Image (cartoon, rainbow, N blue to C red):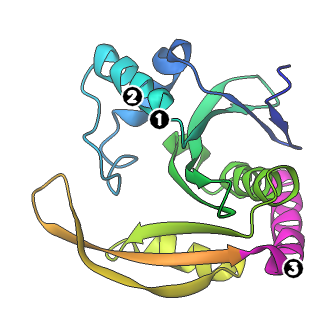
Amino acid sequence: MSNDSLLGRTVRLIPLSVDHAEALFPSASDPEVWRWMPRPRPGSLMDMQAMISQMLEDRARRCFAVQRQSDEAVIGSTSLYELDLAQGRAEIGATWFDRSCWGGPYNAESKLLLFGHGFRDLGLARIALRTDNLNVRSQQALTRLGLVYEGTLRSHMTRQDGTRRDSLYYSLLADEWPAVRDKLLTRVAAKATT
């Protein structure tokens, strides 16, 4: 296991590489999985490799493949991005999971690991997430976790269908992390036993 890996109960976050393209392509090419992603859905393995290469070139991004502990399958990806250590802030995004993993403990534990890494290891003061104004499922999940809704950036991005998207911003501060960590630990434990 790499020193840069983050180990949880049900998943391990391992540094993303172009070698993960083949494992990630089936989920990334699923229109339902990719529905709310702001970047184009990869249409081929070459597109997937190019997208991962582009993500890895961004020095303000730490990209991970999500590996299920039980069988070591790569089931998704997530990133810390817009990482600014001097200002103590980052965002979590570029997160997707194979549809067969939805509703399980994997996304919650991935967030648990990323928040822990950000606050504990990197000394961040703030971590934010943003979501499409139409993605109600994501908004409800972020609120349930205890993140604070900060506001909406109107007409912030263009969706893949050409319509304009408003982005809702949520954040978590270092002093709020312990309470959210406890909620995430409880959720992961409950989902891991079902």
Which circle's residue, 1 or 3, is located before the other in the chain? 1
Q: Is residue 51 left or right of residue 99?
A: left
Q: Residue at x 84, y 52 (%)?
A: 192
Q: Quadrant of residue 13?
A: top right
Q: CA distance from mark 1 to mark 3?
A: 32 Å
Q: Is residue 102 left or right of residue 121?
A: left
Q: Residue 54, labelled with which disc?
A: 2
Magenta residues (range)? 173-194
Q: Residue at x 79, y 29 (%)?
A: 4
Residue located beneath label 1 in the image? 58
Q: Residue at x 81, y 80 (%)?
A: 176
Residue 110 position within the rendered picture, expressed as x and y whole percent measured from the top left: 71, 49
The answer to if 186 sits in the magenta stretch is: yes
Asked if marks 2 and 1 touch (Cβ < 8 Å), the reply is yes
Q: Is residue 7 left or right of residue 85?
A: right
Q: Tell me the quadrant of the picture where the N terminus can be found.
A: top right
Q: Residue 42, labelled with which disc?
A: none
Q: Helix, strand or loop at disc 1?
A: loop
Looking at the image, is mark 1 or mark 3 nearer the viewer?
1
Q: Is residue 127 left or right of residue 176?
A: left
Q: Residues within 10 Å of mark 2 (few under 14, many from 20)?
A: few
Q: Extreme left residue here?
A: 162
Circle 1: residue type? Asp
Q: CA distance from mark 2 to mark 1?
A: 7 Å
Looking at the image, is mark 2 or mark 1 nearer the viewer?
1
Name above or below for residue 79 compared with residue 156. above
Closer-to-camera residue (152/44): 152
Q: Quadrant of residue 167?
A: bottom left
Residue 86 position within the rendered picture, expressed as x and y whole percent measured from the top left: 67, 57
Q: Helix, strand or loop at disc 3?
A: helix
Name above or below for residue 64 compared with residue 116. above
Q: CA distance from mark 2 to mark 3?
A: 35 Å
